[in-house]
Every structure is written in C-alpha cells, then in structure tokens.
Amino acid sequence: MDAVASIDKAIDVLFYLHGSSSDCGVTSIARGLEIPKSSVHRLLAALVRGGLVDRTQTGQYRPGVGLLALGLGVLDREPVVEAGHRVLEEFAQRWGETLFLVAARGGDLRVLDKVEGQGFLRAAPRIGSSVPVHATAVGKLYLAFSDESVAVAMENGREAFTRATLTESMALHREIQEIRDLGVAWNREEWISGLFVVAAPIHGPGQMRAAVAMALPASRLPELGEELLATEIRLAAQQISERVSGVRRGSTAMEKHNDD
Amino acid sequence: MDAVASIDKAIDVLFYLHGSSSDCGVTSIARGLEIPKSSVHRLLAALVRGGLVDRTQTGQYRPGVGLLALGLGVLDREPVVEAGHRVLEEFAQRWGETLFLVAARGGDLRVLDKVEGQGFLRAAPRIGSSVPVHATAVGKLYLAFSDESVAVAMENGREAFTRATLTESMALHREIQEIRDLGVAWNREEWISGLFVVAAPIHGPGQMRAAVAMALPASRLPELGEELLATEIRLAAQQISERVSGVRRGSTAMEKHNDD
DNA sequence: AACATGGTTCCGTATGTTGGAACAAAATGG
DNA sequence: CCATTTTGTTCCAACATACGGAACCATGTT
C-alpha cells in the first residue's frame, strides 16, 4: 500500500517545532529528526507556503498562525466545549480547582477544554493532549460506558504509573462495575502521585459524548470528601448535557471573516 | 527549485476540511479540490496517521485534535496574548465592545486574540484570520510604524471595500502621517459598513510588537466620542506593553503533559 | 434484486522526491 | 578586521515513491 512519506515527515517537522521552546533553524531540525538538511529545507518551504510554518527574517522557523486558525476550528466543531465552558468556569470558581473536558478522538482520549483552578498547586492539563485509559478517571469511565470495541481500541498496555495504578484485569473489572453503579469514576493517584480526580460521563445520543472531570491535590480530599465531589461532578455533567442539547449553531454577532 | 506537491495537496485538504461546516467524505473532497479519489484517500490516510485528521466510523473525515494541540501551541509563543488577554477582558467589560489583538505573522496581519463585547450587534473577528492593510485601523498602524519593507510586503492591492475605503496614495499617505502624530488609527467604515474601529500600537524592542483594537458599531460613535476612544485604546496598549515586559515564562502549576 | 453512490485497494507507469555536494550567507573567534 | 566555521540554500543525477484510472467492496436507495 502506498504511503506519502513526505507528509509523514512534514508532520514530524510540525510536531518538532511545536515541541521546541524556541524558533529552530534548518540544521537543528535536521539533527533532531535525523533528516538531511536539504530535505528539511524543502519540507519547511512547503509548510511555509501552506501557512503552517512561519519563517523569521533570520531564517529560523516556528509554528505558523495558520495552525491557530485550523486548531481553533477544531473547537468550533465541539458543541460540548461550547456548551460546557461556562459550567467549567462556574465549578472551577466555586471550588478553586481545575475542571476539564475529555472525549474520545482519533482512537485516543483527548483533553478538549479546561478551566484551571486558582491554587498554587493545581492540575494543568494541556488541551489537545491525550490521557491513558486504565489509569485515569475519565479513562475508566470510557471503559465502563463505551462500546466495547471503542474501549478495546483505546486501551494500549497497562503501565503502572504509580503504586496505586490498577493493572490486574480482575481489579480493573471490579472497579468498572462500581463505576457503572455509581455513575462516577475516581483517579486516586493512579496516574500521578498527589493527583486526585473525579469524573462523570456526559451522555449523548448513542455513545458517551465526553466526560467532565475535576482534578485536585490529594491533600484536599479529607476537607471536601468523596460524597460531595461525586455530587458536584454529576451536577456539572448534567448541566453540560442539558446545555449541549440546547446549543444553537451560528451567531447573531456581526461577523466578518477573511481567512487566507 | 523543488517543491513537494504532496504536502501542498495535504494542506489543501486540511483547509478544505477546516472550511467545511460538516464532516466530509473522500468523494466530496475529491470533487471540491478536483483531485482523484485515490489520491485524496491516500492524502487523508497520511493525515490521519499523523493525527491532523480524524476519521469517523462511517468513513467521514474532519480536522483532528492534533491540530488543536498544534494550534494552541502557537498561542503559547505569543507573550502579547498571554499578557494582553486580561486587559482585553477588562476593557471589553467596561465598554461592552469587542477588543482584539493583531500582529504581523507570515507576511500578513493576523488576529491573535479577542474578547467579544456583549451587545446584540458586535464585531466577531475570527482568531487566526487575516485582515487587509489599507482598510483597517491596525493595518494603517502597521503602515505608519513598521519598517517600510514589512509594510510593502504586506500590502497587496487596495480594494475599495466600501465607499469610505482610501485607495489613493496621497489620501492614505496623509492619514498615515496623522496616525504617526496621534499614535492612534481609525477605521471609519472603510472595510465593513457599520464597523468602526480604533487601534493603538503595542511597541516592543525594535519593531511594533502588535496592535490592540476596539471595534464597535458606528451607531455608538456619537455616544462615546473619538477623544474618549483614543484615550482608552492608548491606555489599553500601554497596559499590555507593560505586562508583556513583565511576563514570566513557565508555570508553578503541577503539570503533566502527555502529547502524542 | 438491481442499481447508484461512495470508500478502498491495486498496480503499471513515470513523475517527482531524494540527499550529497557545492555554494552563499551569516556568525564566530582570534 | 579577517579567516574560519557554521548554517541556510540551491542544484541535479539517481532512484523509488507517488500517482490515478480501473476495479473491487460496502452501503444506501429504489
């Protein structure tokens, strides 16, 4: 079967630039990706031409604003983000902790939106990043409520991130059963030490549409209690679900768009 | 000079999906871009592999969450956005109108951030989109304060968008002189009828870093007055400039990133 | 059941990509 | 200031990957 190796390499260049903390030259990209300089130069020229990379006057390269337009366009197609953001803000404000939305996209669980808490120590998930299935609250929610084929496709290995990570099938299966009963999932430092997360499903027609989660330092747990957290996250999920159903497409604002 | 036509086509596919209001099939993309179906299918497979496109279970394609990560990463490199967003919120709240940031990127003027007003009739610029140079407040700011080579490169044609658009060199030159004197630029319905914009430069070391603008319906102008608007937008620009100088890199938040 | 439409795969062909070498420009250090 | 080093850019012969028409498969419609 044919592949288009140039596109694979171009995307490698994009993610390399994305992962670099500063602008990059041709030689440093070539070294980083182990590709000849002339190849990198040609790939960059194509990406600059397409608007996905910007070239500085000194011949350095960085991710281009065209990516911003494309990236934000992805959010435009996520009604759960549009509907849910205000709810995240409200609950983040009320409890001072981070709320975020996760959904299955491209065979992976991805963070779609977040509102961070105000605490000095707080969870700061990166929008667009993926999260493991077996070791997170939202991952286990998906295992509990998704089509089995979806769940199996997403699950790749059961790395023991911390001492609390569930890796045995029996233990994981038992917890998934509990999640189905409770309608809420917990991450009790199973992924990251010190990180406690509670999540609830946002149901849609057919499958699970997304999940909403609240993350807090484990040290705050005794103060708040699991009962209260469960009640709150279920409430947030319900409010988002109701808002999604009522979201209207389009805007009454006076709009003028002039994309490239 | 060599080109990589495959990358050009792949980017065409990305923007085609971006511009489509719903998911697309292979055949509709092929028709829209006038490319054979087998070619489109191969391009899509590469983009799916790279995470820039997601494929639905019914064989439809849409922009992928990988673009979201890349796109938001572009903003991470814009200290003016990080520093300026709170100022935009404050002024938008105070006046009830839309504030936005524009900067020169990739030989073009691009909207980097915005906070919309609350009015029923309000400007709603799209982040990432480009704006014309000769017919907007921020465009004329750049003509006034930028390196001439930058300004010339950005200027492509002088389309008369409305009856108010300045297309003659003498008139435009005179106004640019005034902008230099005042430190503020106006768009008096030169781009879109009914749209009034006032903008001020955000200076940085060397060139103009960005511009901050407030957009309002022309009908509100008599109520507010140009004097007040000029004072306010200069104040906003000054506050952003001060905040940019003081922006700190990095975060104290407990972070865990797990990008693809 | 037949037909239409769209997604996917195949494979012979040739077009386009590749990357080492050379060149040009910029940066560095004495 | 100048020689050297490093990096960005261009060239082009060689090669192999990409191309796209045709066929096949899957789904939807009549």
Image: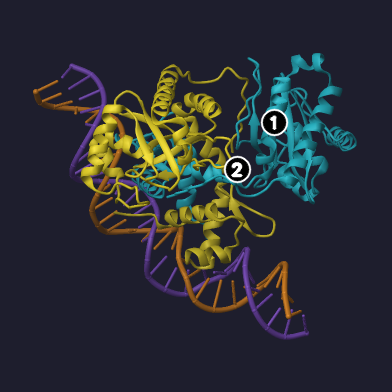
Chain colours: A cyan, B yellow, C purple, D orange
Residue bearing mark 2: A75
Label 2, secondary structure: give it: helix
Q: Report whether residue A191 is seen.
A: no
Q: Which comes before the other along the chain, label 2 or label 1?
A: 2
Q: Nearer the viewer, residue B194 or A250?
A: B194
The answer to whether residue B178 is visible is yes
Q: What's the amino acid at mark 2?
A: Leu
Q: Nearer the viewer, residue B166 or B41?
A: B166
Say which residue appears at 46% left-offset and 52% top-offset: B11
Chain of residue at mark 1: A
What residue is pinned by disc 1? A88
The reply to whether dot 2 and dot 1 touch (C-beta < 8 Å) is: no
**Which residue appears farthest toward the right when viewing the image?**
A181
The spot of residue B236 in percent (x, y) is 44, 24
Q: Is residue B31 above or below residue A59?
A: below
Instruction: Name the amino acid type tagged 1.
Output: Leu
Name the residue located 70 percent from the left edge and 45 percent from the top edge.
Answer: A247
Name the quarter where the N terminus of chain A is drawn: bottom right
> Where's residue B45, x and y in %?
56, 56
* Image-based side of A237 in relation to B165, left or right: right
Pointer 2 local density, CA inside 10 Å: few below 14, some 14–19, many at least 20: some
Distance, label 2 to label 1, CA atoms, is: 16 Å
Q: Residues within 10 Å of mark 1 (few under 14, many from 20)?
A: many
Q: Are marks 2 and 1 on the same chain?
A: yes
Q: Where is residue A145? Give x, y as percent.
A: 82, 43
Query: Is A203 located above or below residue A20 in the figure?
Result: below
Which mark, by number, is residue B64? none
Q: Position of residue A215 (x, y in %)?
A: 72, 25
